[in-house]
Structures are given as C-alpha cells and as structure tokens.
Image (spheres, rainbow, N blue to C red):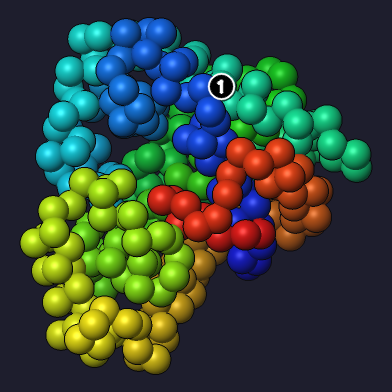
Amino acid sequence: MPTTKFWRSVEVLHDVVYFAPDAKARYEALGLKGYWMGYFASRSAPMGTPPPEMVIATFHGFAPRMVQRALPDAWSLASRDDILTARLDLARDTLAPATEAEGADTARVARELAAIVSGFNLAGKPLAAAHAALERPTDDTGLLWWAASAIREYRGDCHIAVLTAAGLDGVSANTLAVAAGLTAVEQRNMRGWTEDEWAAGYAQLASRGWVDADGTITESGRSARQQIEDATDRVCAAGMDREATGRAITVEEGLRTLARAVLKSGVVSFPNPTATQHP
C-alpha cells in the first residue's frame, strides 16, 4: 500500500497551481473573473464544461452558492482548451525550482507516476478519470504535474466516497478538518459557508461526540478522523493493480525530493485550504 508520505508528496506537486502567486492573473488574462472562477473552471475543465451541480458533487467541500457564482458563466468567458493550457503552463513554470533541485530525477519520477495512473481502476472516480483522459504532456515537467494531478484527484475521489459513506456533508467535513487542526479557521470563508451553516456543521460533529460544546475536537473525534484517513487509504489501494502499488513504493523517495524542493520554494505552505499536510 502507498504510504502517507507518497500521497502527501503528490498533493504538494499538484497544489502548486492553486498557490502560485500569478494564478489569478493567468486566468484573468483569458477573460475569467477573479481567483475562484479560475479555480473552479480550471480544476473542472478536464470533465469538459460541467454544470455547477456536477462540480458541487465532485468537489464536495464548497458551499454550492460559491460554485454557482463561477459556473456556468466561466464557460462563456474563456474556452476550455485555453483554460487547460493556461493551467498546465502555470504548473510547468511553478514547478521549475523543484525540477532543477539537486538530486531530483524529474524524468524518472514523471514516468513512474504516469505508469501508476495507468494501473488505476477508475470506476467511481470521476475527477481522476477526467484528468487521466487528458492528453499526456511530452515534456518531463508537464508529465510530472499531469500524473501527480490524476493521482491526487484519484485519492480525492476515494476520500469523498469515504466521507459521504460516513454521513459527512461538505460543511461537516470542513469543520472536522478545522477541529482536527488540518486547516486554518479561515476555512469557513475560503469554502463559502455562512456562520449558520458552519455552526450546523459543528453541531453535527457534536451530536456524534466528535467535538465538545466549544468546538474542541475530542479523542473520539480524532479517532474518527484517523479512521476516515485509513479507510481512504484502503479504498485507494483496492483500486490499484500490483504493478502500480509497487511503483508507488519504489518512487517515493524521488517523489519526496521533488516535493521538498517545492516546499523550499515557498509556493505551498501549511496549514492551507486544501488540508495538505507536510510530506
């Protein structure tokens, strides 16, 4: 089974497109309006030009109104192909410090990650399937980010399946992450939830004994959150063939070298709204 460090390192490589300082400007140059329209359009564009309902379902943690402010308007302001091109170019440019790091073998890691994607069972994993179906870049850095993104969305799809099976909706999943210290208290605003909705999310956790009256996570809550992570890992492993699993184990050290170089560049910091954790 791939380790936690493998998944966290993949997340760091993928996340550069969200935290790059010029991300907003790149998408605005295409005609999109503001950071969040660029985010929702660029991340969902692998699925085509999906309606907001599909993005709400596949992204899970965002307040529906936040998605509806960006989509479907984005599709009339910029072409899907231009959005995807801008996203890949942003990834290439932002990953440059990592690919040039001492000891980094970008070509090997990119090839191994791409091979892992080929070993996925993508049933029930719509975002991962959409990313995997995109044309594979021919350059090492582009291929690295493409593969890392497909793998990241694969685990994300598995995670959403586990969250929904546990009865956690978008707001309660976010409040649990905040209570567990995985992301900052600003998460409510970052995900578009009202104060009343946020309070209802905490109330749902409290009814399970996962947080105290003041919102502090309990031992039961920490255990439940860890069980969700463990279940996500098991679901991910179940959809990987033996070769993909082996490659994930052998490529981990090279992958972590690249992730550490990204962290050294300061593009991705902690805690952050994606709940990415240090690899």
Label 1 crowd bin: few (<14), some (14–19), many (20+), radius 10 Å: many
264 up-or-down from 44: above or below: below
Q: Is residue 251 visible?
A: no
* 66 up-or-down from 249: above or below: above
Badge 1 element = helix
Instruction: Give percent across and percent down for residue 111.
Output: 74, 35
Q: Nearer the viewer, residue 258 or 117?
A: 258
Quadrant assignment, res 218: bottom left
Q: Nearer the viewer, residue 259 or 152?
A: 259
Q: Residue at x 32, y 8 (%)?
A: 31
The residue positioned 68% from the left and 18% from the top of the image is 138
Q: Quadrant of the N terminus?
A: bottom right
Asked whether, in this view, residue 99 is left or right of residue 277, the answer is: right
Q: Is residue 26 visible?
A: yes
Q: Residue at x 36, y 67 (%)?
A: 178
The x, y position of residue 209, in whole percent, is 24, 89
Q: Is residue 67 left or right of residue 28?
A: left
Residue holding disc 1: 90
Image height of 29 relative to 92, above or below: above
* Residue at x 24% of width, y 82% of height: 214
Q: Amino acid at mark 1?
A: Leu
As drawn, the residue found furthest toward the right would be: 103
